[in-house]
Image: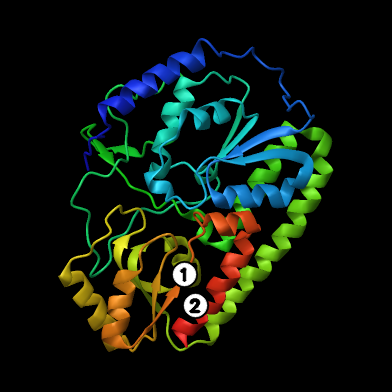
Amino acid sequence: MNKKKRIPRLCCIGTVILAMILTGCVRRQSPPAETKTEGGKLNVVTTLFPYYDFTRQIAGDHIELTMVVPAGMDSHSFEPTPADMITIQNADVLICNGGAMEHWLERVLSAVESPHMVIMTGMDYVDTVQEEIVEGMEEETHDHDHGHGHGDEPEPGHKDMYSHDLADDDGHGEEIEYDEHIWTSPVNAMKLVKGIEETLSAADPGSRAEYEANAESYLLKLKQLDQEFRDVIAHEKRNMIIVGDKFPYRYLADEYGLRYRAAFSGCSTDTEPSARTIAYLIDKMKSEQIPVIYYPELTSHRVAEIIAEETGARPLLLHSCHNVTRREFDSGVTYLELMEQNVTNLKKGLE
């Protein structure tokens, strides 16, 4: 799929100006190999909520931790501000996901000068799967900003973490879209936690023992969560879920053998399914006698409500954990808490 990036002209100009500022007027001196904040703490920046929460569970007060994508925002539509770019430039460790939802990060990393920054990309730590279009699901009909536009090529020698092009036998490139919501599987979450622990320990050897101990304790909780999901699947009478929106749960479904139907794929930017898609989901709900219609966080769940009205099903949240509301963030909500609620709501839909 060839997709063109469409960026407003003013946005492009702003990016160029900011790149000049970051690499010129406020260029910082090359830091030593092990760089910390003035308070002696490692400065760690994460892009998304799952990585933010995993990191704080491992590091606690040993680091200064920042999340770039603001609470309450859909990460797929995020564009960094100048302040965000400076935050990333000042990071000792950057923990990101990779993939199309972070297309903006490649531009930032090409613009800033942080030669000693350690970068961990979550998608390098798990087996990824391609986006899947299942029966009844809408296919996107408009451009989705999943690639680099003209002028967005990475610097020579700089690895492009976000391109997924495969060459066919004739040498022609084919863009492959991977599902990026890797953390929705607790098994993948365990791999990410281990990767974060190893990254932090390498960057801050003096705190290695604390990082390892905290990670081990947290991994036990994730193993318990994994078992809770397996117990639900093993004891319920059905294994299909239906989502009246996009489906960012592919890794969760694959891990536990769930069948699914949804209005859109996980990384779709569409919000209005066709009448045909809604009718299909309604018919599927009725034929399978499914008692719950799910919807993801930070979206309008109007479609789920329409389907519920037509079928008598109950609309329930199935949290993908990609981000949380500002109130949830300020209250300190965790990945484990959100996933425990998913266990409860999933059980209601499968019984």
Residue 67 vs 186, above or below: the answer is above
* Horizontal side of residue 270 vs 226, given as left or right: left
Q: Amino acid at mark 2?
A: Leu
Quadrant hosting residue 37: top right
* Horizontal side of residue 30 vs 244, given as left or right: right
Q: Position of residue 28 (x, y in %)?
A: 61, 14
Please, which residue is most extreme toward the left here? Answer: 276
Residue that numbered label 1 is attached to? 318
Q: Tell me the quadrant of the picture where the N terminus can be found.
A: top left
**Snapshot colouring:** rainbow
Sooner in the amino-acid sequence: mark 2 or mark 1: 1
Quadrant hosting residue 241: bottom left
Residue 210 vs 315, above or below: the answer is above
Q: Position of residue 349 (x, y in %)?
A: 44, 82
Secondary structure category for the residue under label 1 = loop
Spatial separation of the CA atoms under disc 2 and disc 1: 8 Å
Q: Is 334 in front, or is 202?
A: 334
Q: Amino acid at mark 1?
A: Leu
Q: Residue at x 47, y 27 (%)?
A: 82
Can residue 322 be seen here?
yes
- Tag 2: Cα neighbours inside 10 Å, few (<14), some, or many (≥20)? many
* Horizontal side of residue 121 vs 15, given as left or right: right
Residue that numbered label 2 is attached to? 346
Can residue 160 be seen here?
no
Q: Position of residue 76 (x, y in %)?
A: 39, 47
